[in-house]
Every structure is written in C-alpha cells, then in structure tokens.
Image (cartoon, coloured by chain):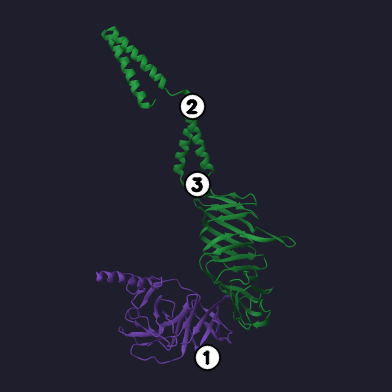
Chain colours: A purple, B green
Amino acid sequence: MALLLLFFLLLPSSGLAQSSCPSLTPTNGDLGYRNRGNRCEGFYLANASESFQIVSLLQGVIPQNWQRNTVLKVSAGASISEAVNVRAVPLSQQPFYRMDGVLQSGASLDWPVGDVLFPSNLKPNNVGVYGWIGSENDKIFIPIRVYKKGVSPVPTPNTLVVRAGTDVDGLIWRWAPMRDGQCGEYKTPQTMGQRNANDPIRITLDSVSSPSFCVDIQANKKGEIRRLRLTLKLRKS
Amino acid sequence: MNHTVRQVLQTAYDNEIAAAVKGLQTGAPIEEIEASLRRIQIYSKLLAEGKPSYWRNRLIAAGTAVICLIIGGLLWSLKLSDLGAPTPIRLELQSHSLQFDIAEPFSVTPGFDSGEKPARQDEARIQNASDLFLPKGQIEKPTWATVRGDHVQLTKLDLAGQSHIELTEDGEFAQVLLTGTGNKCEVSFSGDAVLEAGSDSNGEQIKIPFNTKGVMESIVLNAEGHDAKPTEIRIRPARFWPIENAKVAQLSFWQLRATGPGEEHFESAIKKGTVTLLDVAVSENLEEKDNLSLEGLDLQRFKIWSDGGSLHVQLDATVKRISAGPQGYEKNLSPSLLQYMREQKPLTFFWSAVLFLWGLLWGAKKTLFD
C-alpha cells in the first residue's frame, strides 16, 4: 500500500520535471533538447533571427580542455538572494543548442559535458552562459561563473557577449545606472565599428561603476537605414 | 373508420359477392343467395359510410401544400444568426479610426528607421502617461512629453491583457489611446531633437535639446491612463507598423465628430470595405459612414496597418451576428438557412427541393383538380 502511494506521489512530480522544459522542438536522437535531471539541454530546431541577442554574461571564462567525464559547476554570485535562471547557448547562431537550468540561492548546478557538449564537439570557446532574474518581460541579467568541479573559480571581469544575425555597422554600446527599475541617463557611447553577422561582440564591463545598470547596444543594419537595438538590464553579482 | 377495418370489410364484401355468384352457378338454394345478397348490401352500406369525405381529402392536400410553403419560407427567411450558429467572414476595410480590446498580452517591437532628414520634423506627443521615464533630465512625476526631431517613432507597444486600444489616423498624425493595467510603450528618436516634458500635477516643466549623432534615445512610459483619461500618443508622420494576430475580443469602427459648438456625436469611421460571407461566397460592399457591428467575434487572422492616409484592417473570423449598412438601415448579413444549404449541403438542398416541389404540386393537384 505504501509503495503504491509512493508511486502515485512520484508520478506527477516526474511529469512536472518533463513539462518544466521550455517548449522547443528537439532534434531527433539522444542529443535532442530534453530534460536531463537537473537541467534541460540539447539541440533543437528553430529559425535564425537577424536582431541582437545576448549570448553570454560571464564572470571569467569557461574552462578549456574538456574531457568526456568533465563536470562543470555553474553558479551566480553570493550576493544574489533569489533563484537565478541560467542558460547556455553557442556564441554562433548555429547549431541551435541550449541548456536551461535554475540556480537556487547560493547553490550551484552540475553540468556534465559528456551528455551533449562533448559528443556534439561543441568547443568551450564557442559556448556562452548567462543568468537572469525577474519576469519574462522584465529580465535582469546576472553574470554567471563556470568552473571545473573541484577547482575554485578565479574572480575576473564581467564580460557581456551579444551577436547580431546580420552584418552591422555604426556599432556602439553605452551604459546607464538604473533608477527606480528603469534605465537612467546613458554615459557617452563607445564605438565598435562594424561586425559580420553572428560575430560575437564582446563588451567588458570594467568601466561600469554602478551595481545595477542598463547596457544599450545599437547598430545600423549594413547598407540599410534600419537601426537595430538591444537594451539589457544587468546586476553585478 | 380506420384503414384496417375498411380492408376487412372490403375483403368480406368481395368474398360475399364471389360466394353469391358461385351459388347461382352451382344451383344453390335461393334462400342462401338472398341471404348473401342482404349481407352484400350491408357491407356496401358500411363501406360507403366509412369512405373519407371529399372535403377531408381536400383539407389534407391543401395542408400538405401549405406546410411545404411554410418550411420553404422559414428556410428562406431564417438566418444562421437566429439559430445562434457562427458565421465565418472575411473583412477588408479602410477606416479613419478603430477600437479593440486585447484579450491576451501582445507586444509589437518594430525596428527604428533613420534615413534622410525629413522635410518636416517628426513629432510625438504623449499625454496622460501613468509613468514617464525620460532619457535625460529629472522631473517630479512627469505625465506628458513632446519630442520634435529628425526621426521620431513609436518603437514598442507592450499591451497587457484586458486593455483597450483606439487607433486613429487623420492624415497628419497617428493617434494611439490606451487604457488598461500594465501597458508599456517606447517612443524613440535620433538626430537633432528637442524634448519637452512636464507634470500635470505640479506644473513643473523642462526642455532639453539633443544631438544624438545617430544614436537612438527613448522615452519609456507606462500607459495605463491618468486621472481617468486614457494615455494618448500622437505621432507625425501618421503611420503604424502592422499589428498582426493580436487576440482581439471586441472590434468597432467609430469616431467622435464635432457637429457644432460644444457638440459631438459618434459616427462610423469606415471609409470603404468589403465583407465576404465565406459559407455562401457572397460579398457585401461597405460605403463611407456605413455602420458595421460584429457580435461574438472570434478571430482567426487579424492585421492592421497604415499607409499614411488610412487604417487598413484585414481579418478572418467567425461572428455570432453581423450587421451593416447606413445609419438606421443596417441589415443582418448572416446567410439564410436556404443560402447555407445551397452552398454547403448541395445534396440535402437538392432532395429537400424535390420533396418541397412534389409536396406543393401534389397538394395543389389534389386540392384543385381531384
């Protein structure tokens, strides 16, 4: 009787874990996007976008030299008291790979590279990770640390990486302190020239002196009058 | 007398005649034959008594014809909407103004175009904002802002569910009126521009010149209305990007027209259009100022855009009731049951028509000629 009760108690919880993955269309095979215990991870089918997208916000860099049995640890800073959504994507637009997980306050997430990253030959220098808190419509992005299990992370500058799905010129970025949850007055823009489609655009956030701030990235679609823009709210951890 | 009793009597009558004839041929006693003849007379009388009357026959025939006519008339005059059945429609129209309710959260974030400097400055006027966040300058609770510059555009419309939106275009300005909780908008500008902003509550006001050198600056606002008035955004040049596939619960086409000093009344904002009843492939033209009412709207496809002179609406939907026409002469456009059967159930329509004509002709023949 007790076993039967246990079975029925476990049944809905395992179903919830499956359904908690975002609704993406997974590719066929074992590397398709699906629930992998503590996270959802894999490849999926999607259409390319030409707008700006955040692909990484890291404190430090992702460790190099992966082996099949390497387990990465993912964590946010100790100053974040809320659960942090964490996402990993390739720095290039394709392949369409994604890892989604949740970091409980002060906790870390084990990320075994042997499940998807190593078999698919995704290289560490082509993977970005970022975190966020807040609602889907009002995200505040948080820098994430990724380090090998058993190796203490070294504090290093926060680096934001974005990409545009189209060739751009007149690229600038600027930052503004946050004021009442909104972006305040922006500082002088820093020019970054032109970039090809899907080139990672790296922005080192050393110069930002505010703990909560907005980053505004703008560029013209090359050869057109259309202005592309990405405005992000960030909090240092 | 019912049919079975008549049959029993008729059989007995026929048998009795046969028996009498046989008796005569075989030399049966004359008493038997006389008795048989008496029974034949009785059967004959009973059969004559039980025969349906002439008028009764005519009444049945006439009744059949009348019932056929009533059914035909009902099929012709009853509309699908009278039975509560949805009517699929396709609507294409141009209007000065339109109003709709958003049933589910909806967001439009078009890009920002910064081409040649326009001959006439772009302009955006924001009024009755519940919160207004300026790109520069501090002011206590601003509720209004005006920006004039080289390029000024509405770059974000974030509508929460249960909000009401009204779009109007008068050739020079496009106007958006918003009410509802949780709506957010963004007006962006670049190049040489002047931003003025102020507060209705304390009268404070600022004026800031900008030279953004191509960088976009934005005014962000919470558009939930202020002091029971909707948040208003007026943009020149008058243009909207397409709003597509928003979950819209209500849709109407009205505008407020001044009819005299201090007098205004609502009238239709429709310029022209076409309603197609998809079930019966019938199109109805809408003329300027025609009223159009769409009750029980359930949208499958919805698109609004502007060409700088008119608002264009295209939609596929089902409606519980659709009526259109000049003020006071609106007619129900829902197809009749007969129209619906002819287009959608041709076999049923054919056999119903055959049955109707047979019933009508049979009834008429029996009534008039039998």
Tag 3 near tag 2, CB within 8 Å:
no
Rendered-image quadrant of the N terminus of chain A = bottom left
The residue positioned farthest toward the front in the image shown? A1
Q: Mark 2 points at which residue?
A: B58
CA gap between label 1 and label 2 equals 104 Å
Q: In this view, does A151 lie above or below B271?
A: below
Give A194 or A236, whichever is nearer the viewer.
A236
Q: Is mark 1 on a helix, strand or loop?
A: helix
| Residue matched to label 3 | B340
Q: Can residue A233 be seen in this view?
A: yes
Residue A207 numbered mark, or none? 1
User: Which type of secondary structure does the marked residue at label 3 adopt?
Assistant: helix
Question: Could you tell me which secondary element the residue under label 2 belongs to?
Answer: helix
Q: Answer few, some or many: residues within 10 Å of disc 3's Cα (few below 14, many 20 plus, some between 14 and 19).
A: many
Q: Position of residue A154 (x, y in %)?
A: 40, 92
- The span from disc 3 to disc 1 (Cα, nearest Å) is 71 Å
Q: Are marks 3 and 1 on the same chain?
A: no
Q: In this view, does B6 lie above or below A183?
A: above
Q: Mark 2 lies on which chain?
A: B
Labels 1 and 2 positioned on one and the same chain: no
For residue A12, which quarter of the picture? bottom left
Q: What residue type is labelled 1?
A: Ser
Q: In the rendered picture of this protein, how many numbered marks are placed on residues?
A: 3
Residue B91 percent coordinates (x, y): 56, 56
- Position of A123 with respect to B228 (left or right) is left
Q: Which of marks 3 and 2 is nearer the N terminus?
A: 2
Query: Mark 3 belongs to which subunit?
Result: B
Q: What residue type is labelled 3?
A: Tyr
| Residue A222 shows up from this direction | no
Residue B369, image x and y in percent?
50, 24
Q: How crowded is mark 2: few (under 14 residues within 10 Å), some or many (20 or more)?
A: some
